[in-house]
Image: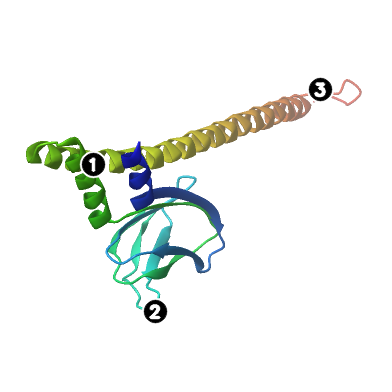
Amino acid sequence: MAICDCWLQIQIGRILTFESESQLSCFYEPLEVGMILNIGMRPTFDSVYPMQFRVTSPSGDFSDWASGDGDAHMEHNTTENGAYEICVYTRRPMKINLYLQFYSPEKMEKSLNAFFDHNKISKDIQNSVMASTHRIYKIYYHLKFYNQMVVRDEALQLHNSEFIQNYNIAFCIVAILITISQVYYVRKLFRIDPNRIQF
């Protein structure tokens, strides 16, 4: 159980969902030296509009912009202790999912080594467990992020099906009205008035 507590303290992942108002939206995350920060950004609903984000260190050093059409990713190594600023920008207002995962490889290794030493586990097994644990955690958060995207796609499909259904209803109503008016005008065109003199 102790290993789980340490693990939770040195590796954290979360997904933030928010409305981007086509201006710079910034968030702050307290991080330590030597941490690895993985960031991913996607719109909640399917979209290929340009989007980008950057990370700023506590001393004001900017990272390069991570950008893409409908998707952007970055892996950043922290070099200072303090609150890092994560700024997101989109060219138009949209709902965004921002995926964050940060961990300390050094603390993770120390925590696992303490567990291995306590339980007298061989070096080969230690290396395998460390590699597997790290990969399992990354897979877990990638699956969590993927599930958010599946929910987004299902919502988009539902929205599109409602639009198609409404379009079909409107099209049928317009087609019926046009057909009735055509029949009326054609019959009126060929109607014979018995009161008029026929030649």
Residue at 29% across / 43% down in the picture? 138
Q: Which residue lies under the disc numbered 1?
A: 115
Secondary structure of the residue carrying tag 2 is: loop
Residue at 72% across / 29% down in the picture? 177
Q: Which residue lies under the disc numbered 3?
A: 192
Instruction: Residue type at mark 1: give it.
Output: Phe
Left or right, 124 with reference to 30: left
Occupied quadrant, residue 187: top right
Instruction: Residue type at mark 2: give it.
Output: Gly
Choose between 142 and 95: the one closer to the eye.
142
When the figure is inspected, residue 134 is found, relative to residue 32, above or below; the finding is: above
Are the residues tagged 2 and 1 within 8 Å (C-beta)? no
Q: Which residue lies under the disc numbered 2?
A: 60
Residue 31 image offset from top left, x and y in percent: 38, 63
Occupied quadrant, residue 53: bottom left
Instruction: Residue type at mark 3: give it.
Output: Ile
Alpha-carbon span between mark 1 and mark 3: 102 Å
Residue 71 image offset from top left, x and y in percent: 37, 53
Left or right, 23 with reference to 98: right
Question: Which label is found at residue 173?
Answer: none
Asked whether residue 108 is in view, the answer is: yes
Q: Nearer the viewer, mark 2 or mark 1?
A: 1
Task: In the displayed orientation, state which residue is furthest to the top.
Answer: 194
